[in-house]
Image (tube, helix red, strand yellow):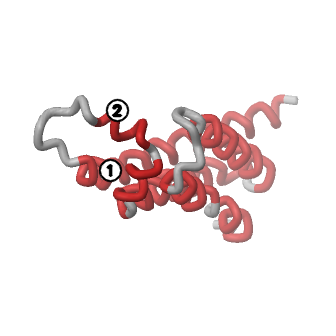
Amino acid sequence: MNWRLLAPLALPGPVIGALTVAGVFPRGADRWVWLVVVAAAAVLIARREPRRAIKHGALIGFWNGATATLIQALWMDPLLANNPWMVEAFSRQPKGFDMEFFLFMLVPFIGVAGGAVTALLSILFVRVRNSG
């Protein structure tokens, strides 16, 4: 593993999670931030570790997705206070719905999804780079 590559790429997940808790992003804007972060990570991984792009992409994508979601789950009260649109979105859930439990349950799934997307984009960029 190239830890010199992975260390800086591991920062966006916790930072985006904290910024979301703080209410910095308007509704839906975080997905565009994630698009830029994942694409940038995939490009850097493809350039610096083309032979191990899938492994590095999967690891950093899992870390960033899981840590961002975990931070949101751990600070649920400030998250909801700073993002009233989330309260509105979850108000339509059935009685007894536990949003905190829901977010904690999402942590591994968001991590795996983030890892898969980052790994696939990394290998795609490796192939595009090698074809030219």
Position above or below: 129 against 100: above
Position above or below: 129 against 41: above
Q: Which numbered tag is attached to residue 89?
A: 2
Spot occupied by residue 111 in the image (x, y as percentages of width and height): 44, 50
Res 6 quadrant in image: bottom right
The residue singled out by tag 1 in the image is: 103
Spot occupied by residue 114 in the image (x, y as percentages of width and height): 51, 45
Going 39% across and 62% down the picture, which residue do you hit? 75
Q: Which numbered tag is attached to residue 1?
A: none
Viewer-nearest of discs 2 and 1:
2
Spot occupied by residue 24 in the image (x, y as percentages of width and height): 59, 49
* 83 left or right of 96 in image: right
Near-viewer residue (16 or 75) = 75
The amino acid marked with disc number 1 is: Leu
Spot occupied by residue 23 in the image (x, y as percentages of width and height): 53, 49
Q: Earlier in the sequence, mark 2 or mark 1?
A: 2
Secondary structure at numbered mark 2 = helix
Secondary structure at numbered mark 1 = helix
Going 54% across and 33% down the picture, which residue do you hit? 28
**Which quadrant of the rendered structure holds the C terminus?**
top right
Res 26 quadrant in image: top right
Going 30% across and 55% down the picture, which residue do you hit? 104
The amino acid marked with disc number 2 is: Ala
Residue 58 makes an appearance in the image: no
**Which quadrant of the rendered structure holds the N terminus?**
bottom right
Near-viewer residue (26 or 34) = 26
